[in-house]
Image (spheres, helix red, strand yellow):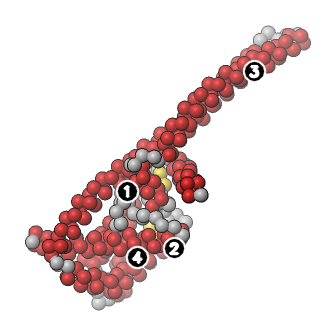
Amino acid sequence: MFFEKISFFGFSLYEMCLLFLIWSFLGWAIEVCAHALKMGEYSNRGFLSMPICPIYGVGVLMITIALERFMDVPFAVFLMSSLICTSFELAVGVLMKLIFHNMWWDYSDEHFNFKGYICLKVSIEWGLGCLIVEYCVEPWIEGFIGVIPRTVGVIVIIIMGILIVIDCINSVSAVYRLNLRLKEISEISQKMYDYSQKLGKSFADKALEAADAGAETAADIYMAREKAVERADIIKEEVSEKKDELIDRLRARYDALTAFTDVKDKRVVRLIKAFPSLKSVDYGDTLEKLRTELKERIRRKGA
């Protein structure tokens, strides 16, 4: 078969594809369980909507291929797997930030971290995890792959490959939808602030003009103040009407942006929930407000 004729570093393409799929699923399961234990709730973890985390599949493949010759030295496996996984995590984090303008995880609160992408604690966990993977789990999985009928395995690889590509396209689209939404929400907030400042300044300037108009005698000063108060009340009423009208329009648009009623918006919501530490490079404060509002909507819906 085509998948068996092509090989890399002693592993056929068939074996590599199945190892990738199995470990991507197991990685997703680990993430889901860890999040549930930490947060007390279920969350579909990972960048994709499917129950897989490709970063785990790729990571285990890299470790399995790179460390095959060092399997007789567990300490070497620990050190090298820590280094490889940490380097891979750093590369993926930087690349995703450059592409999507978002930071998907953040270790800034951990000791000995590098710009929030990696930290010593997680690097040690990678090394210990890889020891378990390589010496305890991997032999069982390779045996499991060996008993799968080749035709069944190939069909699974092809179907899952197509589904992953489709899911990846949808997830990337969801990220861009999120970024566009954050941009528009940020612009709406800025417009509301700018308009309030502009109207407030206009109100103050006109009131001062009315108060200073030719007031030389005490009587003039008294009359000027009376006119200023009267003029101020008129301006205040006009400003209030215009401001309310604009704010109503902006608020309606803001509510539409945060309602997440469209079917495609479900993917955006899933990404926000799947990455609690997700930070926007360009609209960090807006994302935090959106996350808070989303949690409140979910809480009210569940109440």
Q: Amino acid at mark 4?
A: Trp
Looking at the figure, which quarter contains the N terminus?
A: bottom left
Let me know if residue 87 appears in the view. no
Q: Is residue 147 above or below residue 18?
A: below
Q: Secondary structure at mark 1?
A: helix
Q: Is residue 159 visible?
A: yes
Question: Is disc 4 surrounded by few (<14), some (14 to 19) or many (20+) residues within 10 Å?
Answer: some
Q: Counting residues from the N terminus, which is met first, the one under dot 1 or under dot 2?
A: 2
Q: Which mark is residue 126?
A: 4
Mark 2 and mark 3 lie on one chain; the one further toward the N terminus is 2
Q: Residue at x 36, y 60 (%)?
A: 49
Q: Which residue is mark 3?
A: 233
The numbered disc on residue 6 is: none
**Type of residue at label 2?**
Leu
What is the secondary structure assignment of the residue under circle 2?
helix
Residue 96, disc: 1
Label 2 environment density (alpha carbons within 10 Å; few <14, some 14–19, many ≥20) = few
What kind of residue is marked 1?
Met
Do labels 2 and 4 touch, CB within 8 Å?
no
Of the image marks 4 and 1, the number of the one nearer the N terminus: 1
- How far, Cα to Cα, is label 2 from label 4? 19 Å
Q: Give the Cα distance between marks 4 and 1.
A: 20 Å
Number of the label disc, if any, that sits on residue 37: 2
Quadrant where the C terminus is found in the figure: bottom right
Question: Disc 1 to disc 2, how far (Cα)?
Answer: 27 Å
Quarter residue 295 falls in: bottom right
